[in-house]
Image (spheres, coloured by chain):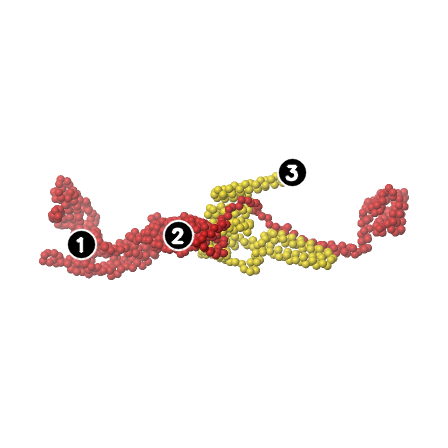
Chain colours: A red, B yellow
Amino acid sequence: MASAQVQFEAKVSKQKLGVNERLRVDFEMNQDGDNFNPPDFANFTVVGGPNQSVSNSWINGVRTYKKTYSYFLAPKSRGNFTISQASITIEGETYKTTPIKIEVTAAVEVPKDPNDPNYLAAENIHLVAEVSKTNPYLNEAITVVYKLYVSPRISVTNYSEIDSPRYNDFWSQNIDTQGQKVENGTFNGEDYRYVVLRKTVLYPQKTGKLDIEPLSLNIDMRVPTNRRDIFGSILMTRVTRTVSAGNKTINVKPLPEVGKPLDFTGAVGDFKFDVNASKTELDATESLQLKVNVRGNGNLKLFKLPKVSLPSSLEVYEPEHNESVNTNLSGMQGSISDSYTIVPQYKGKYPIPSISFSYFDLKTETYKRLSSNEIIINVLNGPNSNDASEGNSTSSINKQAVVFNNEQFAFIKTKTTFSSIKQNYFFKTNLFWSLLLLPFLAIPLAILIRNKKASRDADVYGNRIRKANRLARKYLTNAKKSLGKKEAFYIALEKALHNYLKAKLHIETSDLSKDIINNLLKEKQVNNQVISDFISILESCELARYTPIDSVTMQEDYDKAAKTISLIDKQAK
Amino acid sequence: MKHLLYIILFLLSFSAFAQNQALFERANALYNEGKYAEAIDAYNTILETGNHSADLYFNMANAHYKLNHIGPSIYFYEKALQLTPDDADINNNIAYARNMTIDAIDVIPDVGFAKLIKNITNKLSFDVWAKASVFLVFCFVVLFLIYYFTYSTIKKRVTFISSLTALVLVCITLALAFHRYSLDKNDNPAIVFAQESKVKSDPNNRSEESFRLHEGTKVQVLQTYNNWKKIRLSDGKTGWVLSQDIKLLNDI
């Protein structure tokens, strides 16, 4: 049979109309049915209809059947109305259309001459710029699509751009729209054909209100007139018209300052970041590639990749910048990378610190930071950096010398002696100052002592007196103490004299008699006068025990004894 | 009673000493097994007892180097070098550690007379210079007194000249001691511990960034202001850096 699918649908000429305009509603079915039941057009006045039309055609043996009921409606008032369901019975089953919403606006101006070609051209051709977002962030991708809507009633024969827009303060890229197809769409609720003239991706580079300049086209077209030829078909007239898309204003928001990383370089979008080294173990003077790579979706061409900071002992060349970026309506996609060539010169381990890259994520509207892992490059063989200064590397490539590698990383030390961390310093202590300065005092002191000694030695008389005094002090102290007490004084005095003789002449007390004393003193070449004086003192000592003696005599005897002792001392050889 | 106390104290100190030796050996064993972090902990316990040695610092630095800690590794090598500046092993390994650092800083070399003076001054510590000068003072005094009291002409001549020489030497050693002391006092090196440290022109966050330093770089600390330290690099550049970014070698 014919098509199995039964279709029954309602179509309106426009969904939005002024209160002074009219509307046409068609109910179409593709199989004949009975009991057509139109909706009650509650808010409309049925101006014409129902008109019924049937078309039946066979093409290549396939039958196409269409039956249409048409109504012309005039709205009764302003507002939003619904044309409710119509129903029909086809082969015993009831089919219904979907309700259609109609918006009735205020009265529209009806031109004086609706058949004026220029008026028709203006009404039936529209150039529209569609902007994906009117308040983007700085560096957020937006798209502008220019569409030319043409009503089915007129036909375009030619068009040319007379003014192509310049996007000041935007980074822009046109997307190729070659081979564009005419598509069907609606414009203001009416059926139109449209063609996409131009697609542009824009990245705003400035904040604030930015204007997108309009696109202007010169269009040649043919519009129907109210005249007809003799066959009854409508005569067309040729019209040239300039249309332009309106000036669009974009309000660009600045990126938030809150939480903005210091190393933010303006990347906005959604990215992945990684750092790779082509190898991590190698010999000196071999090269390796370090690749800093950012992949994702965003303003890839509009920011700088973070720089790699490398140990100074690695030789690094200027990075090679690679971009593989596709731009489509959703913005730039792809990856950009910096490739560093690194040649280590010396043996050792070289850490490449982690590099971080921060960007503004549009989805969460926050800043995000991605960090790479730390890479450690281990240079296994090569010269030690210590002898870099000597550095005459006579590299004999053909022959490999067998060299004892004595420039290894040294092992730990296994023996030690500990000392206290707290140290006591000697310098600038009091001990230091005294040890430094006091020896100098020794010099004047020694000189002074020597001078004194010399002057004493020079003073002969004084010396004698001092000597006598010393002797007297030595032997006569007891006697002097008991001066005044007769008995005790003379006993002490005698004892003192005997002691003196014992010390001086080395004789024992037992054999001490006056004759022996006399002889001994004479042997010692002591003056006779002195000897007799000494003897007389001894005698007076004995005598004094039995005779009364006053204190004056005692003093005299004492002085005499002292004098005699000193004289003997001086004269005795 | 007092003697007993002294003996006990002596034994105690000896036992602490023996403990440190045992710890040191245990830490060395850990290092040899590749357990560097544990070895560092053990070395640290020795440091906490208030004892140190160049070998201890050297071993700690080696362990940090094996763990790729640039800053601590350089720090302890420098500590070891402070105690024994001419050790070949330390100088060898610090070169490896310096390879890991990022900053390349030129050293302005001393030339001529200044270099000579510096070399001589750095031969001995200021304490040794001070002791030498004290010894020479005694020499001078003894010789001078001999000169003064002696009568023979030859002896007088010899002692006079030698005593004057001793006096001159006293002045020289004393001057060197003071010079070394001032050098040591002004020498306040520090190692950058932060991975990247911004050096500012003034001690506040608002000021302009002068340059950047990376972990392991040795700097001289000139002065301190609040939480900032004024530093000088070996090529003469100066700037202010946050205190926590660097670690002083002389913890006084």
Mark 3 belongs to which subunit?
B
Of the two numbered discs 3 and 1 in the rendering, the one whose residue sits closer to the viewer: 3
- Residue shown at the point (24%, 61%) measured from the top left: A162
Q: Position of residue A535 (x, y in %)?
A: 89, 47
Q: Which residue is mark 1?
A: A152
Kind of residue at badge 1: Pro
- Report the side of B42 relative to A218 (left or right): right
- Quarter placement of the N terminus of chain A: top left
Q: Residues within 10 Å of mark 2 (few under 14, many from 20)?
A: some
Kind of residue at badge 2: Gln
Of the two numbered discs 2 and 1 in the rendering, the one whose residue sits closer to the viewer: 2
Q: Position of residue A244 (x, y in %)?
A: 24, 58
**Could you say whether the residue bearing mark 3 is in a helix, strand or loop?**
loop
Q: Nearer the viewer, residue A321 or B233?
A: A321
Q: Is residue B101 visible?
A: no
**Could you say whether the residue bearing mark 2 is in a helix, strand or loop?**
strand
Q: Is residue A503 visible?
A: yes
**Label 3 in the same subunit as label 1:** no
Q: Which residue is mark 3?
A: B1
- Residue shown at the point (58%, 40%) measured from the top left: B15
Kind of residue at badge 3: Met
Q: Which residue is mark 2?
A: A289
Q: CA distance from mark 2 to mark 3?
A: 76 Å
Q: Looking at the rendering, which quadrant does residue A33 occupy?
A: top left
**Could you say whether the residue bearing mark 1 is in a helix, strand or loop?**
loop
